[in-house]
Image (tube, rainbow, N blue to C red):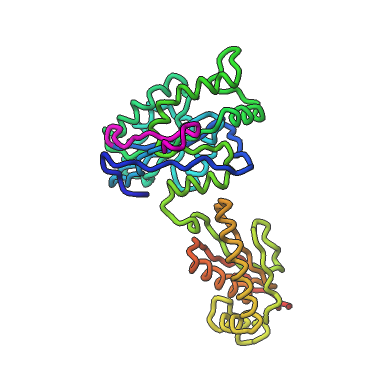
Amino acid sequence: MTAKQPAGQSPATPEKPATDSEGARQDPCGGGAAPVGGTDAGRRAATASDAAKDPAEPARAPQPAVPAAGKPEIVVVTGMSGAGRTEALHILEDLGYFCIDNLPPTMILQLTKLFDLPTSTALRLAVVCDTRSREFFGRLREELGKLADQHVDYRVLFLDADDETLLKRYSSLRRRHPMARGSMTVSQAIAVERERLTSIRELANVVIDTSHMRPARLRKRIAAEFSDTSPERGMNVSVFSFGFKYGVPYDADIVIDVRFLPNPFYDPDLRDLTGSDAPVRDFVMGAPETTEFMGAWERLLDVVMPGYVGEGKQHLSIAVGCTGGQHRSVAIAEATGEYLLSKGYLVTTTHRDVARRSEPEED
């Protein structure tokens, strides 16, 4: 997160709407989202741009603040129904936020008091406040002022989309619009909601237009605003060794077979050791076949890993297998984990079958 913006400083400009050809993922709750924020009685609030406005008039929004010691950092997610609020909340949850959907604005300040409990360790909270809370939603601006009075750092994330896109999404979802009353059409409900959200949209730090935005791009955009880690460390990588004789893991994203490498099992001095032991590791990694393989394997990882990160994958599982899961797979799995760590990824390396001692391995 960036430093708190001094009073009077010009806020940042929100990102222009995306132009991807594919539509954004439909929001099952009919929601959308975009960031907003403030600290001292609304002084951090600023005007956010609208896609329909003259591009010569750039949107402005306050910079995110660094949470005060012991105080929660709050992201208030709001915006047009059908613009992606639920998807945004899922992304924030993946980023480590404690998330609550459809929270009446009057409960936000009360919720922050839970973080003062001795057993509370969470300091990042994301809540969705939108027109589903009906008459309670009208108090959102007032409640944000109360947060500022209590010196609670917050940001408001406002998701938007054009009327045509919202209408198409609701037509495919076949759900009732939260603003629809009586014989009101979806188009009329969208117009009513947009008018009601005008004052809140003006407070937004960042307005994200999801009209032509794919889910992966939305994830990247939100992560850039609300994550304090690198994109690489946003994906948990699990590298583990296994033995084919005990079954191929069903939950692996990538499975690599290293049974073609020289087998230390047939050396009596190495048989009872594992790939974690230096003699076995030196045997496996010192083989010419391994040197050639590791060069190709690392080049492949250099290609696929950024791709997974770019697609917003949160967990990647890489399985390295040999016959019994004792020697070759263990050594290669550890070398793979070390390589990915050197590239900045968050890696855990384990060995599924290393504790098993059984009959001789076969190449």
Question: Can you say whether 186 is above or below 214 in the image?
Answer: above
- Residue 126: image location, x then y, percent: 43, 39
Residue 53 forms part of the magenta stretch: yes
Question: Can you say whether 71 is above or below 189 in the image?
Answer: below
Q: Residue lying at the far top in this picture: please name it.
A: 182
The residue located at (61%, 75%) in the rendering is 294
The residue located at (50%, 66%) in the rendering is 343
Give the left or right position of residue 165, taking residue 95 as reference: right
Q: Say which quadrant the C terminus sits in.
A: bottom right
Give the left or right position of residue 124, taking residue 209 as reference: left
Query: What's the magenta bit mostly, secondary-structure-wise?
Result: loop
The residue located at (38%, 43%) in the rendering is 12
Q: Quadrant of residue 182?
A: top right
The residue located at (60%, 29%) in the rendering is 164
Q: Quadrant of residue 285?
A: bottom right
**Could you tell me if residue 117 is visible in this image?**
no
Give the left or right position of residue 73, taking residue 330 as reference: left
Q: Nearer the viewer, residue 207 or 125?
A: 207
Q: Nearer the viewer, residue 34 or 346?
A: 34
Q: Nearer the viewer, residue 245 or 330?
A: 330
Q: Which residues are magenta?
A: 40-58
Give the left or right position of residue 293, taking residue 225 as reference: right
Q: Quadrant of residue 284?
A: bottom right
